[in-house]
Image: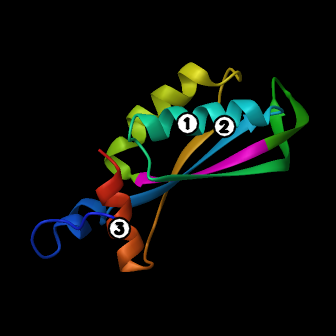
């Protein structure tokens, strides 16, 4: 059982600006797992989904390039985006790792509260 917030709406206030962050790890699923574990251990995220085998096409150094990557879908609070970005940049093997924050505009209230409760 997960602990509930103290007082009505306390966790919801913390999680109202919940974010899903997208990050990609090129080629190695092990790198994606490492990023996920570091973020979880440091309580920066509530959950990380790793989706291997994502095929990406992109501009790089003046040419269209491609790669098979692992997509990380990271659930956290928007206030932690800068810290998460810095941690991913320290671990990631790419020169310019993708880390983008996307707003969660709605969803299961209990799940959104859980994101707020599990991140510090």
Reading the image, the residue beneath label 1 is 37
- Compared to residue 40, the image places residue 109 above or below, namely below
Q: Residues within 10 Å of mark 3 (few under 14, many from 20)?
A: few
Q: Position of residue 103 (x, y in %)?
A: 45, 62
Which class describes the residues within 10 Å of circle 2: few (<14), some (14-19), or many (20+)?
Answer: some
Residue 26 left/right relative to 100: right
CA distance separating discs 2 and 3: 26 Å
Q: Quadrant of residue 105?
A: bottom left
Q: Which residue is the site of mark 2?
A: 33
Residue in the picture at 80% in, 48% down:
52
Which comes before the other along the chain, label 2 or label 3?
3
Callout 3 touching callout 1 (CB < 8 Å)? no
Q: Residue furthest front?
A: 1
**Range shown magenta:** 70-76
Q: Position of residue 72 (x, y in %)?
A: 65, 47
Reply above or below: 50 against 59: below
- What numbered label is drawn on residue 16? none
Secondary-structure class at tag 3 = loop
Mark sitting earlier along the chain (3/1): 3
Question: Horizontally, is 108 left or right of 31 in the view?
Answer: left
Residue 74: percent from left, percent from top: 54, 51
The mark closer to the camera, 3 or 1, is 3
Residue 59 percent across, percent down from the top left: 81, 36
Q: Nearer the viewer, mark 2 or mark 3?
A: 3
Quadrant in the rendering for residue 6: bottom left
The relative height of residue 32 versus residue 10 in the rendered view (above or below) is: above
Label 2: state its secondary structure. Answer: helix
Q: Quadrant of the C terminus?
A: top left
At 70% across and 30% down in the image, what residue appears? 31
Instruction: Give the tally of numbered discs.
Output: 3
Kindly check if marks 1 and 2 are in contact, taking CB atoms under 8 A apart as contact: yes
- Residue beneath disc 3: 1
């Amino acid at each position: 059982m997960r602990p509930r917030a103290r007082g009505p709406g306390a966790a919801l206030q913390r999680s109202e600006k919940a974010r899903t962050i997208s990050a990609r790890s090129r080629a190695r699923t092990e790198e994606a797992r490492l990023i996920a574990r570091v973020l979880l251990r440091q309580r920066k995220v509530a959950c990380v989904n790793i989706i291997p085998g994502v095929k990406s096409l992109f501009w790089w150094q003046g040419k269209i390039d491609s790669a098979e990557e692992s997509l990380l879908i990271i659930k956290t609070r928007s206030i932690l985006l800068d810290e998460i970005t810095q941690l991913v940049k320290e671990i990631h093997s790419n020169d310019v790792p993708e880390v983008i924050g996307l707003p969660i505009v709605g969803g299961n209230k209990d799940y959104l509260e859980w994101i707020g409760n599990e991140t510090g």
